[in-house]
Image (tube, rainbow, N blue to C red):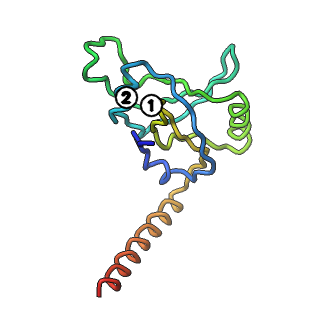
Amino acid sequence: MPILANNRRASFDYDLLENYEAGLVLLGHEAKSAKAGHVNLSGAYVSLRSGNNGSELWLVGAHISPYRFAGKMNDYDPNRERKLLLKKREIAYLIGKIQEKGLTLVPVKMYTKRSFVKLEFALGRGKKKYDKRESIKKRELDRQIRTLTKRQISR
């Protein structure tokens, strides 16, 4: 399961509560470009849309660069919206969670599973500024503890 893209900012900006896995509807050259690792998830989010076939989830703001060997694609938009593939039960559950508690859906990472490109997204609650400061302090303390224990072991 090689990871193609990781959204490190997501865990800093949001408290991630539950993780979900979804398939992505990609064009052929997009799939090849994604498998080559030319994906950027920063600033991306998952949007809910109600259509005539029911509700659907869409990945918005993810950048997949054009595949180098695909030739000219004049009308290709690398930031286009991409449909997520989930079961109706899961979509209904997520709709309830989003409306009930004021949570949001944040893409965390994109990876391959067998030959499929999958997106892991999480149900998250936005952090306040003081929460972010606490996470920075905790990260720095953990780093200091690791360096101190390495020094003691090496002696």
Residue 68 in the image: above or below residue 19: above
The residue beneath circle 1 is 61
Residue 56 in the image: above or below residue 133: above
Residue 54 in the image: above or below residue 3: above
With 146 as the anchor, is 50 left or right in this view? Answer: right
Three-letter residue code for mark 1: Gly
Tell me residue 102's x, y (percent): 67, 43
Could you classify mark 2 by the number of other residues whose Cα lies within 10 Å: few (under 14), some (14-19), or many (20 or more)?
A: many
For the N terminus, the quadrant is top left
Please give the name of the residue rendered at 45% of the width and 38% of the height, measured from the top-left corner.
Answer: 111
- Inter-mark Cα distance, 2 to 1: 10 Å
Q: Secondary structure at mark 2?
A: strand
Please give the name of the residue rendered at 69% of the width and 13% of the height, measured from the top-left corner.
Answer: 52
Could you classify mark 1 by the number of other residues whose Cα lies within 10 Å: few (under 14), some (14-19), or many (20 or more)?
A: some
Q: Which mark is residue 64?
A: 2
Which of 130 and 21 lies nearest the eye of the viewer? 21
With 133 as the anchor, is 34 left or right in this view? Answer: left
Please give the name of the residue rendered at 29% of the width and 88% of the height, measured from the top-left corner.
Answer: 155
Tell me residue 97's x, y (percent): 71, 41
Q: Which mark is residue 40?
A: none
Tell me residue 135's x, y (percent): 49, 63
